[in-house]
Each structure stands twice: as C-alpha cells, then as structure tokens.
Amino acid sequence: MQDIWADIATVLIDEETLQTRIRAMAAQIEADYANDEDLLLICVLKGAFMFLADISRALKRVHSIDFMGISSYGKGTTSQGAVKIIMDLKAPIEDRNILIVEDIIDSGRTLEYMRRSLLARSPASLRICTLLNKPARREIDVAVDYIGFDIPDEFVVGYGLDFDEIYRNLPYIAVLKPDVFAHILD
Ligand code: IMP
Ligand code: MG
C-alpha cells in the first residue's frame, strides 16, 4: 500500500488552524443571514465534502444541505478548461438562499460556471464560500463572499482535496513532494 504521508513535503495549514478559521467563517455567515431566513448550503463535490461537514457543524443556525458534482480536471494539476455537471442537485432552488461551499478557487472557471447555472434557476440569493483561494491563478473574476485562506500558487492536497483521486483523507492542507508529480504529464 502506498504511504501517502511519505509523499508530503510540507503541511501548509494544520488541523487546528483550519478549525479555528472555519468557526470564524461560520460566525460571519450566522451574522449575515437573519435568524428566520432559509439557508441552503450547496457542497461542490468531491473536494468540498470535508469542509462542508465542518462548516455545517459549526453553523449554529437552521440550514439544509445539497450536493453538486462538478468535473473540471483531468489527471494533471491544471484545469482542462471544460467544466461540467456530473451530478445535479436533488431539489429545485427557486426562491431559496443559496450558499455555495467550495474547496478552492484557482482559475475561477468552476465557480463562474456554477454561479451562472444556479442563477438561471432563480434562487432568492446566491453567495459563495471557499476554504482556499489562489489569487495568483485567477482567470475569471468571480465575487467571493467568504474566503478561508489565501494560499500561494502551489498545488495542495488533503482535507478533501485530491491529486489523482488520493490524499483526500489527510486531515490538513499539504504540499506534495515534487517527485510525486513526476509521472504525470501536465
Ligand atoms: P478552477 O475552476 O480553476 O477555479 O478550479 C477549481 C477546482 O479545481 C477546485 O474545485 C478543485 O477541485 C480543483 N483544484 C484547483 N486547485 C487545486 C489544488 O491545488 N489542489 C487540488 N485541487 C485543486
Ligand atoms: Mg472542487
């Protein structure tokens, strides 16, 4: 079995730092929505599943959750350009307050695509929450309402984020050793 811990170069954001920031983000979200307002969190699969689990538990207010599967990456570490919905929401979102929960914004293509396709379904409001943001790589300027951490232009894994579908179970955000990427042609 592959030793995924041996592939880690550095831990960029440790578990405690993640949880502290997520609690603060939840408090900010609580303050921004009135207590009696409806709120639906939409988790962008797969990468945001751990973040969704933690931010949902940190939110001390009523909310519901739904999931959307989006695919924009092939095997490499850079976007392939084409974004597509591979699993749609369970229910309509008309007149609902939507908060998109995303793992990371890189080029901005995925979120811009999601924003446009969800706005076409006439929600009452639409906001975006991302755990990580790589400002240096932005190609499309998407307005993001909640950002956990700005990070440098490095490919990260862990806490839901993968490289070639592994490393998602690492409880922190990490950078891989360069030789891990060696067999992948970008
Ligand atoms: P964008 O469409 O270029 O903004 O890419 C966003 C998506 O690419 C995210 O939802 C992630 O799934 C993936 N992604 C971008 N950067 C990374 C990274 O550093 N590690 C793992 N996945 C990433
Ligand atoms: Mg993602």
Image: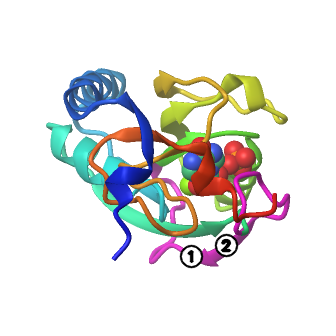
Q: Is residue 9 left or right of residue 79?
A: left
Residue extent of the magenta highlight: 75-98
| Colour pattern of the rendering | rainbow
| Residue closer to the observer: 12 or 56 | 12
Instruction: Report the residue at 28% width, 31% height from top.
Output: 14
Residue at 21% x, 24% y is 20
Report whether the residue tagged 2 is closer than 8 Å to ligand 2: no
Three-letter amino acid code of the residue under disc 1: Asp
Asked whether the viewer can see residue 171, the reply is yes
Measured in 3D between alpha carbons, the distance from the residue under mark 2 to the one under mark 1, in whole angstroms, is 6 Å
Residue denoted by label 1: 88
Q: Percent from the top left, x then y, of residue 72? A: 72, 63
Q: Which residue is denoted by mark 2 in the rendering?
A: 85
Q: Is residue 166 left or right of residue 122?
A: left
Q: Are marks 2 and 1 in contact (CB under 8 Å)?
A: yes
Q: Position of residue 135 (x, y in %)?
A: 69, 24
Going by the numbered disc 2, the residue's amino acid type is Ile
Label 1 crowding class (10 Å Cα cut-off): few <14, some 14-19, many 20+?
few
User: Residue at the location (32% across, 26% down)?
Assistant: 25
Relative vertical location of residue 94 with respect to residue 41 in this rendering, above or below? below
Q: Nearer the viewer, residue 63 or 183?
A: 183
Q: Quadrant of residue 79?
A: bottom right
Magenta residue check for 117: no
Principal secondary structure, stretch drawn in magenta:
loop
Number of residue marks: 2
